[in-house]
């Protein structure tokens, strides 16, 4: 059995003292590949995940400007991202999108930077990893107008109807630890319905630890609990979920 954590933040300061142990424990738990998201604290530093991926063989990276940091992006930022997307361990552009919960950047700025990065990913022939929070309609409208490739709906928080709409636009649906929370019935309903060939699992570590670690620091090794919960919800073997999500990750990201 092997699993892939398709979205984690190994550059986070919560891992500063034991990052090597966190990676090793993930490998021991059967998580043989991790995708470290490279948005970090935003521009001008666009390489936090690349530095980790270069250090640890099982770790791959993304680059991108998170909507929280959209106001920091400049023309130089986009030029640097274009160059970094050619790095051999960079698999995607993300996480990018819209976040209307915190509004750390003006919404029109978020939208403009989102569209610019979608265009950049298209030119680089890279998939995108989407962050959307309390901005579903605008996110989907933007993708429908400006994106024709593949991508991942990271930390999916919608229901079956939203999952269907995202898949119709070519997206894979990635479930994080929230799917294990007892009250997350809408997300659980989506997890039951998403076809095996569109399913991914992630931790979003160090955030959103699954049951039984809820409230504690999340780690890539905990993706096992998310996958097991999805298997239970679908009444399918855990091994089938592990195999499918690993194959999907390879198809959309690693083996492009």
Image: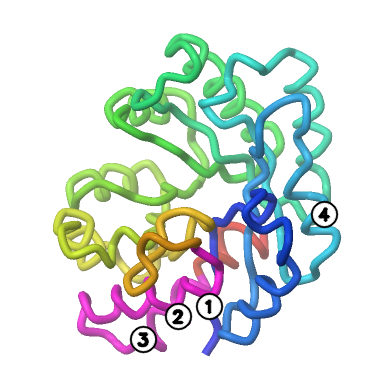
The reply to whether dot 3 and dot 1 touch (C-beta < 8 Å) is no
Query: How many C-alpha atoms fall within 10 Å of the one at disc 2: few (<14), some, or many (≥20)?
Result: many
The residues tagged by marks 3 and 2 sit, at their Cα atoms, a distance apart of 6 Å
Main SS, magenta region, reads: helix
Quadrant hosting residue 140: top left
| Of pointers 4 and 3, the one earlier in the residue sequence | 4
Mark seen at residue 3:
1
x, y percent for residue 12: 64, 49
Q: Which residue is mark 2?
A: 242
What's the magenta region? 218-247
Mark seen at residue 88:
4
User: Could you tell me which residue is drawn at 80 percent across and 67 percent down?
Assistant: 56
The reply to whether dot 1 and dot 2 touch (C-beta < 8 Å) is yes
The reply to whether dot 3 and dot 2 touch (C-beta < 8 Å) is yes
Mark seen at residue 225:
none
Whether 39 is drawn above or below 110: the answer is below
Whether 130 is drawn above or below 160: the answer is above
Q: Nearer the viewer, mark 1 or mark 4?
A: 1
Depth check: 187 or 28 in front?
28
Q: Which residue is mark 3?
A: 238
x, y percent for residue 170: 41, 47
Give the SS element for disc 3.
helix
| Of pointers 1 and 4, the one earlier in the residue sequence | 1
The residues tagged by marks 1 and 2 sit, at their Cα atoms, a distance apart of 5 Å
Whether 247 is drawn above or below 143: the answer is below
Q: Quadrant of the C terminus?
A: bottom right
């Amino acid at each position: 059995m092997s699993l892939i954590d398709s979205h984690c933040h190994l550059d986070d300061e919560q891992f500063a003292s034991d990052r090597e142990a966190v990676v090793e424990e993930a490998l021991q738990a059967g998580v043989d590949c991790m995708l470290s998201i490279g948005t970090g604290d935003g521009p001008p530093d666009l390489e936090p995940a690349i530095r980790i991926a270069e250090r640890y063989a099982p770790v791959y990276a993304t680059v991108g400007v998170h909507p929280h940091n959209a106001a920091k992006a400049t023309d130089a930022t986009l030029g640097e991202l274009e160059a970094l997307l050619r790095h051999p361990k960079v698999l995607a552009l993300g996480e990018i999108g819209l976040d209307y919960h915190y509004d750390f950047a003006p919404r029109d700025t978020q939208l403009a930077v989102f569209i610019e990065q979608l265009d950049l990913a298209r030119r680089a022939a890279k998939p995108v990893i989407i962050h959307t929070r309390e901005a579903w309609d605008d996110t989907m409208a933007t993708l429908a107008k400006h994106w024709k490739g593949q991508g991942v709906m990271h930390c999916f928080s919608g229901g079956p109807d939203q999952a269907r709409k995202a898949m119709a636009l070519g997206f894979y649906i990635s479930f994080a630890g929230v799917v294990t929370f007892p009250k997350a019935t809408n997300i659980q309903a989506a997890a039951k319905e998403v076809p095996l060939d569109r399913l991914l699992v992630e931790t979003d570590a160090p955030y959103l630890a699954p049951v039984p670690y809820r409230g504690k620091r999340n780690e890539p090794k905990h993706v096992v609990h998310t996958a097991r919960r999805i298997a239970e919800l679908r009444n399918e073997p855990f091994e089938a979920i592990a195999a499918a999500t690993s194959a999907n990750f390879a198809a959309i990201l690693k083996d492009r």
